[in-house]
Amino acid sequence: MRKGSQIVLDCLRAEGVDLVFGYPGGAIMPLYDALDGSSVRHILTRHEQGAVFAAEGYARSTGKVGVAMATSGPGATNLITGIADAKMDSVPLVCITGQVRSALIGTDAFQETDVFGMTLSLTKWNRLVRSIEEIPEVIAQGFYWARSGRPGPVMIDIPVDMLKASMEFNGPVKFTPPRPAEHVGSESTFATTLIALLQQAKKPVALVGAGAKLSGAVDDLQQVLDLLQVPTFATVHGLGAIKQDSPYYLGMVGMHGTRAANLALHETDLLLVFGARLDDRVTGEPTRFAPHAKIVHFEIDPSQLDRVRPCELPVVGNLADTIPAFYQEAKHAHLPDFGAWRAVACGPERDEPVVAGLAHPTRNFLDQLFARMPEDGTGTILADVGQHQMWSAQRYRASSPRGFITSGGLGAMGFALPAAVGVQLAKPDSVVLCVSGDGGFQMNIQELATVHRLGLPIKMVIVDNKYLGMVRQWQQLFYDRNYAETDLSDNPDFVEIAKAYKISASLLTEEEFVDPARANDVSDKLDRFFRSRQPELLVFECHPEANVYPMVPAGAALSEMVFEE
Amino acid sequence: MHIFHIRYRNTQGTLMRILGATSRRGIDLPYVQAEPAEHSHRVTLLMDVNAKQVGQLCRDWHAIVDVVDVRPGVPIKELWDQAHLGLPHPPESVTAENSRAATA
């Protein structure tokens, strides 16, 4: 006989789980009680949101399913932001929550919430377990749906009496889906149609999103793009999918993308989309998005097609299948030489105007940080949400597909620090650099305790402008400088806070950074910061009114970027 | 008005997920009927949506794990009349026009 709690852990092991993140409480105590006898390692965070973001970091950096667990009621509701984040960014995640005992469900019992109902719209799949016998099947199914197709979050809610009960257990089960996944076979005709579209096109471009990375099709995509040689750009989650030194690569596209990428996207007559949702941060004003283009959309999730406007050629399927299928046809086809268009789109006249601006020192600071990351692509940068996130996305030359991690779709402040915990645990020997703003860092600052407890050598940076910087930037540009409730000038002393958590910390001011006489000291400080094998925090105080440019204002087309206020 | 027939496996929450695809867009549902149908279940929904929303909804429903089939159609007169007899109406301020605008 095995208890429900033991069966849960047995099933997790069968799914390859060796690490879970969580926070205990009443309704999930039996599962914590069973951890001792299992080979599943539990990481205690200091808040359930920290646990779910850490599980996301683990999943985003490895491609494996991240697992977070929490108790009922507030424990479960604290997971919800992370679940929504995983849904938006297609992160495979399984959340397990304890629930009040079955007899009390629906009675507004202590710490009871309808987390099943709350997560219906945020998960790919969820279940409230109704009997101990269901547990093996539910867990197998949950992991299947988290991994399959477009990855995403799954929630499993288990009443505490199911965790305490016992039954004869014959071992974990395998789940077989009732509806087989659709595959694009070699007989597919889309490749012929796409080749015809390319033969008619004068200004084709390629847009690369997260799907290229999630599907493991990065090498295949590079092969296709090397063949086509069309101007190519990436979403924030597509960064790292394409080699930065590819002669046709134009960097990030969208609201804070490069001028060259945005202009090419605005002018194109054939847009090839590889695994991107085309959200509003990428398209600018949707009605003026790529106004001259036919769209060919490679996408695993059909619900993402035609969201902005109808595409001429949807290519539905796993990019790991569809891209090679296209390449096999394309390499034998007669394709036009797009050299003239490429020379315009990638030419120096498309570079951004040189505007020093108040953000210049901060961008240089980030450049100096990123230059110290390993060149072999083993390092990972995590960016929180806000101005520092966009500066990081603009400046980091990602050298590996999973080398840049951020909360892109949901834009959840407080993501980076706990996610960095998950990344560092997944890759204990790699350099993990966590860049946050002063606002976001305080949203999960308690995870410094987790970092200290585990001795994780995370390099934490706070870009401290004493504002909620991105909101302030919009207030400056679009609300007549009415800085309503974005002033954080009474921030705590982050260095002293870190020291209270027994974490080494130091301060670098912008004045110190730009002083040529102190250049060697600054360089030494950054070198020491990166050499340390202990947790380190570096607070960089930047100008409070530094802005992120280029910027496509809300309601504008991508071609209407601004470069200074 | 559009009508949709959605076949689904009657697993936990699947009907709610189907309805949620409409509620998240602020679309009123003057007629809903869910019933067993052969080896699965079927829900019939009547709603006022534009062509773009039809496409979005059908794709969203297809993406739900236990949805088996989605078929849009034209409502028959009896269903239309039934939907407008004694059923709760949206507030007067919510016309079909501004409802569409809000969800555009």
Image (spheres, coloured by chain):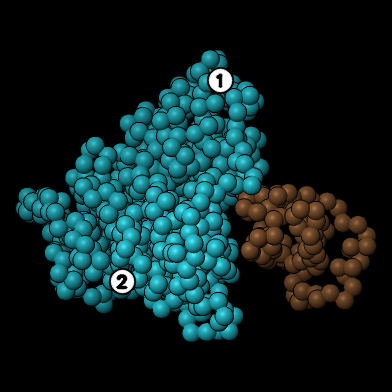
Q: Residue at x 43, y 37 (%)?
A: A216
Q: Where is residue A522 in the image (x, y as percent from the top left)?
A: 11, 53
Residue at left offset 41%, top offset 57% = A10
- Which residue lies at the image location 16% right of the left edge and 74% below the top edge? A500
Question: For chain B, what colour was chosen?
Answer: brown
- Name the kind of residue labelled 1 in the image: Glu
Tell me where residue A146 appears, x and y as whole percent: 50, 52
How packed mark 2 is, by other alpha carbons closer than 10 Å (few <14, some 14-19, many 20 or more), is some
What quarter of the picture does the N terminus of chain A occupy?
bottom left
In-front residue for pair A100/A349? A100
Indicate the chain on which mark 2 is placed.
Answer: A
Separation of residues labelled 1 and 2 (CA atoms):
53 Å
Q: Mark 1 points at which residue?
A: A329
Query: Which chain does the cyan colour mark?
Result: A
Q: In this view, does B54 lie to the left or right of A27?
A: right
Residue picked out by circle 2: A46
- Element type where label 2 sits in the image: loop
Report the chain holding disc 1: A
Along the viewing direction, whichever of A397 and B101 lies nearer the viewer: A397
Asked where in the image residue A5 lies, by quadrant, the reply is bottom left
Quarter of the picture containing the C terminus of chain A is bottom left
Nearer the observer, disc 1 or disc 2? 2
